[in-house]
Each structure stands twice: as C-alpha cells, then as structure tokens.
Amino acid sequence: FFVGSEFSQNWHIPAHWSTGTLPDDILADPTSVNVGLSDAVISDSVLHRDVRVDNSRTVTVEAGSFLSVLNSLNINDGYISGDGTVNVKRPDPAAIYGGGQNGFVGAKLVRAVTSSGVFRFPVGSNGVYAGVDFSNISGSGELDVKAHSGAYPNPNLPTNRLQRYWDLASDLIADITLHYHDSEVVGNEANYRVIDANTSAVFPTEIDTVNNTATYRVPFPTTNRNVTLAEA
C-alpha cells in the first residue's frame, strides 16, 4: 500500500510504497493526480496519466527530474516550477488546459506536436506569464520551450531589448508567437523584432503592442535557439 501523501509525494518512487517496489497496476496504468491541498516536489522521473494543479499550488520539478504526462495537464490555477522538465506526450492542442498569469510552467516544457492546430506552451518565470504559441507546424515531433526573466546576457545585442528571453528547441518549421509583459519592455516596443540572442540574426516580426505579442516564422529547422526581442 501507498505510504506517502497523495498531494506532496511521488507515486512513482518505490520507497513510497510499503513493499519498496512499484505495484504492477501502477506500472501498467499510470495514476492521475490532483495537486490541490499542498505544494509538491518531484525529485525523480515520474509518469502520470493526467496531472491537475489548482488552488494556486506549485509543483517543483527539481534539476535532472522529469514529470511526464501521458494524457492531459491542467494548470488553470496552479504552477509548475524548477529546473527539471515537464513532458506532455499526447500530440493534441487540448492536452494542456489553462495557462496564463494564474497558472504556468516555469520548468522546461516539452510537448508532442503535429501539423494540425495551435500548440500553446504556457510558460513563464519570476511570477510572470510568458507563453509561446506554435502554429502552421511543418510536421510532427517534439518542441521544447523554457522562459527566462531578464535581458539575455550578450553585450552585442541592442541595449534596448526585452527583459525576457526564451530557449526554443525544435527540428520543425513553424509560426511562433511570443507573449511578454509591459513591465519587461525597454525602449520603443513598436520597433521590436525577434532576434536570435546568440547570433544577433533578426527575423521579420509582427508586433502587437496592445496585447504584447511578437509573431515570426522559423525559416529553417534548428536544434536549439535562444530568442529575445529588441529594437532593430
């Protein structure tokens, strides 16, 4: 039988079961969990069918740890933080519910995607939502996104640049929309363009200064890229 707390321990750590091993039914049929009574910490690799975080609770995924979700992730009123990875494996735009200032992923977020629909990555950091949306995706695969607070540390970038950047990893071509907050803008927002934070390459960008979004198209596949916004 389970000897840990449903809302604060990991179902998939053998030591949390009285036998010291995972039951066969847990291995064959991953659990669904609702983190709503207290915050939780994941310090291992765990697999759940569905995960719901609500009541403004936070799940922390520690560095080197993985939270894999087979079906759906609900963060309408809850947060996932940490230096680990969240992996949502169902390639469906509806596999993640919620996301915004009241609930986002601060850890690296990996999603299975297809060419159909808009795949939202409700990420953020330092208490601020900074989601990324992918549309018109060139095929199927996985996309990785992590949001960071502060200006990207490259002295060759323009001084007037967003106090925010994102890590993107993909082998797919797509239209990408970046969401940011007014408080992160430095300089003339209307002149912002998406910039590769490492190479300083500038991408044609559609800026919406009312909704604080920047949309651009990835012109070629890239394994890893850091992007930010700056006057260009």
Image (cartoon, grey):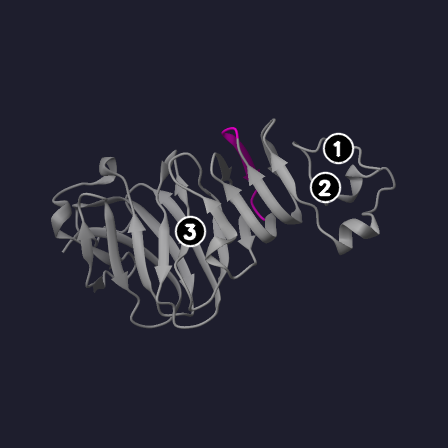
* Residue drawn 12% across the image and 49% down it: 190
Give how far across and how far down residue 116 sits, in percent: 42, 66
Q: Are marks 1 and 2 in contact (CB under 8 Å)?
A: yes
Give how far across and how far down residue 196 sits, in percent: 28, 60
Q: Quadrant of the N terminus?
A: top right
Q: Quadrant of the C terminus?
A: bottom left
Q: Disc 2 marks which amino acid? A: Trp
97 within the magenta span: no
Q: Quadrant of residue 224?
A: bottom left
Q: Give the residue at mark 3.
A: 121
Q: Is residue 219 visible?
A: yes
Identify the mark nearer the N-term, 1 or 3: 1
Q: Give the residue at mark 2.
A: 11
* Residue drawn 80% across the image and 33% down it: 3
Residue 30 placement, left or right of 185:
right
Residue neighbourhood size for the residue with mark 3, other residues' Cα within 10 Å, grouped as few (<14), some (14–19), many (≥20):
many
Q: Quadrant of residue 99?
A: top left
Q: Give the residue at mark 1.
A: 4
Give how far across and how far down residue 68 sits, in percent: 60, 52
Q: Is residue 84 visible?
A: no
Q: Disc 1 marks which amino acid? A: Gly
Seen from the viewer's position, the closer of residues 200 and 120 is 120
Give how far across and how far down residue 195 sits, in percent: 24, 58
Span of residues in magenta: 55-64
Q: CA distance from mark 1 to mark 3?
A: 31 Å
